[in-house]
Image (cartoon, helix red, strand yellow):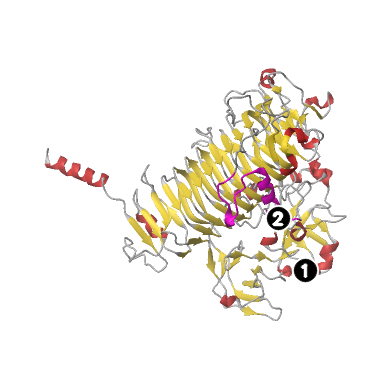
Amino acid sequence: MTLKLTVLWLLFVTTSCATAADYFVAVDGRDSNSGTSIAEPWRTVGRAAQLMQPGDTCWIREGVYRETIKLTRSGQKYKPLTFSRYKEERVIIDGSDPVIGPWVKDETGIWKTNFTSTSPIETVFCGGRMMTEARWPNCSWEENWNAEHKWALTGNDSQLGLIESPELASSNLDLSGGLLYLKLSKGNNCFTRPITGHHAGSKSLQYDKTGIEGRAWNEDSMPERIKKFGFEQNRFFVVAKGALDAAGEWWLDTERSELLFIPPGNGGDPNQLDVTVKSRVAGFEAEDVSDIVIEGIEFRGCNLRLDECRRSVVRNCHFLYPSTPRIFPDGKTALEMQKNLRVTGEDNVLERLLIEWAVDGALEVEGSGNVIENCVVHDSNLHGRHPGPAIGVRGRAERRREAAKNPNVIRRCTVYNVGGVGIYAQGNGPAIAEYNHVFNAGLYCVDISSLYVPVGKEMTGTVVHHNWLHDISGIGFRVDIQGRGITVHHNLAWNVTVGCKLQGFQLAAYNNTVLTHDANGGFIVVFEPDASPEELAGWRVRNNVAHAFLDRLSLRNDSRKSKREFVIPLATVEGAVDHNVIVQAEIQPQLFVDPTGHDFRPEPAGPLAGKGVAVDGLVTANQSSAPSIGALEPNSIPWQAGADWMNDKRPVPKTPAEATVLAKQLRPASIPLIKHDRRYEDQ
């Protein structure tokens, strides 16, 4: 072997067998240190990110880090770059920076400090807790689900651009120069507009209505919706300097370059408090990198954004206030401005994450083969905006215009206390939603689903199965339009306004238990009006149990409207639409073990147990006998949905009965779940 080849061979062996390095970061470190020992740590995680090689680990010591770590290097398969807390130490990446002060108290009890910002700030924190921008009616974030505190209602003579409210007059506040949050007409969204006119003692408030009518505010601003629902009894609130009157409120006076603040609780001197202002969107940012592991880190007032990444893992992390958007001018702009916790790319894994108190959507995942597993997401979409689901997934290939190569999977996640949709699956390519537990969803929307496929024409192969969906102001599960090749099976929905709605060319529904409060909201099927006879023949609705099975016309240009009623009973078709059982009050005790106690297992000697028909590809709990009708089998332990852990050390519900109790405990009494509202009449 020549000398040159020997040197190259030795270099290859040395490089291949090199031991992965450990680096250390600490709040009392220095970036001029070596970073290679616990005695000489770096100060910033960003310093480690600049130097790490495949297989290296950055151990982060306890403390608060105020930085955005930009990841520009990749690991390798089985040799990732790992960022982890050291042992069990508490590591916080904070998206806010301290307000330097000094604070001075004026004669009204409001504290002020000089503060210069080139743009409006999103939020202020005190002691790590998000404070409330000065608002009327008064309502802290912790009171968000108290509807009587959160919202005022528009009164008589309100119109587009004008709110009339006697309560507004009685407040005697001057809300000029503020920002209006309004749920117009149907109330399925919340948007913002500048206030153009108001004075103390006036019941009339003018706001900028430019460009609203049409589709700017999505369906809520369509002329036909405005005509139908009008401008009265619309929910709204206002943020304004003149509303600064409650503990925990703040306001940025840009004209005077002053930050105004009333400390929370019993007051106190903000010079002695940890008052911070949000400064950064993300704790970690990456684009087009692979094989990254982020583990055991808390994110406060920020999130992470991994774009077009591959084989990255985010595990055992906690996100508190991950997104805090302040303005929603219109549907298009609001989507463009979204800065939610977001991961896009292929084969990424997010597991055992706690995501809480996201003002809008909590988690977005886009791409192919991504997995969201064993996560808990709660208290999100705080204003009730349809486009802000707790968990949203979108399928697509790396080239964006092509279908996802592999399904995105949402598995064993627990989602609760959501203003709108719980889990939202869309895009080009299949998705799998399995063993999830969604409850207390739709709290501030009137037309949502806890598990929602909005357009299913490009989602062939999607499967929704073994989910608990309950205590929902809206629909349990739904394929909205143009569904094709989508299967829903063994889902258990109860305490919902509408059980399910399946609309499309060719869908399959097997062994679902759907229990609503009245027959009008049962199991709804909508056959697309332009579906071919061959497509219609491919529908399968079998082994389901519900209060009613209904065949409803489409809301969109259905030519059949002149030929038949809008809703008729779903016809039985042997071998396709059959073995479905309608729950009637007089026979309900014969169907389930204990329906009032939420034990929905079939009564062993009743008309559900063993009375179903076998379905190719579906395995039942008892393979030695025929399947039962519905989602559960008799004389067996009910399958369990949701994460295997709960936040705040709450016990994990193991049965629908325990899940129902938990939902009631976590939902304020002021939120009525089953709303008899005219805005539901189209469902």
Q: Position of residue 634 (x, y in %)?
A: 65, 33
Tell me the crowding category of disc 1: few under 14, some 14 to 19, or many 20 or more residues within 10 angstroms, Cα based: some
Where disc 1 sits, the SS reads loop
Mark 1 and mark 2 residues within 8 Å of each other at the beta carbon: no
Residue extending farthest to the left is 2
Element under disc 2: strand
Please indicate, yes or no, whether residue 73 appears anywhere in the rendered image: no
The residue shown at (42%, 44%) is 290
* Cα–Cα gap, marks 1 and 2: 18 Å
Residue 13 or residue 84, whichever sits in front: 84
Q: Nearer the viewer, residue 409 or 332?
A: 409
Q: Is residue 560 magenta?
A: no
Query: Label 1 is placed on what type of residue?
Result: Asp
Residue 265: quarter of image? bottom right
Q: Residue at x 23, y 47 (%)?
A: 14
Q: Is residue 649 magenta?
A: yes
Give, as a single range, the part of the protein colored magenta: 642-669
Q: Residue furthest right?
A: 156
Looking at the rendered structure, the kind of residue marked 2 is: Thr
- On the image, the x and y values in percent for residue 223 come to 79, 43
- Residue at image mark 2: 192
Quarter of the image with the C terminus in it: top right
Number of marks in the image?
A: 2
Q: Is residue 342 above or below residue 96?
A: above
Seen as rendered, the residue at the extreme bottom is 107
What label sits on residue 174 in the rendered view? Answer: 1
Residue at 69% in and 38% down: 600
Q: Which percent across, then down, holds residue 100?
A: 54, 74
Left or right: residue 314 versus residue 278 is left
Image quarter (top left, top right, bottom left or bottom right) of the N terminus: top left
Q: Say whether disc 1 or disc 2 marks the residue closer to the N-terminus.
A: 1
Q: Is residue 236 left or right of residue 617?
A: right
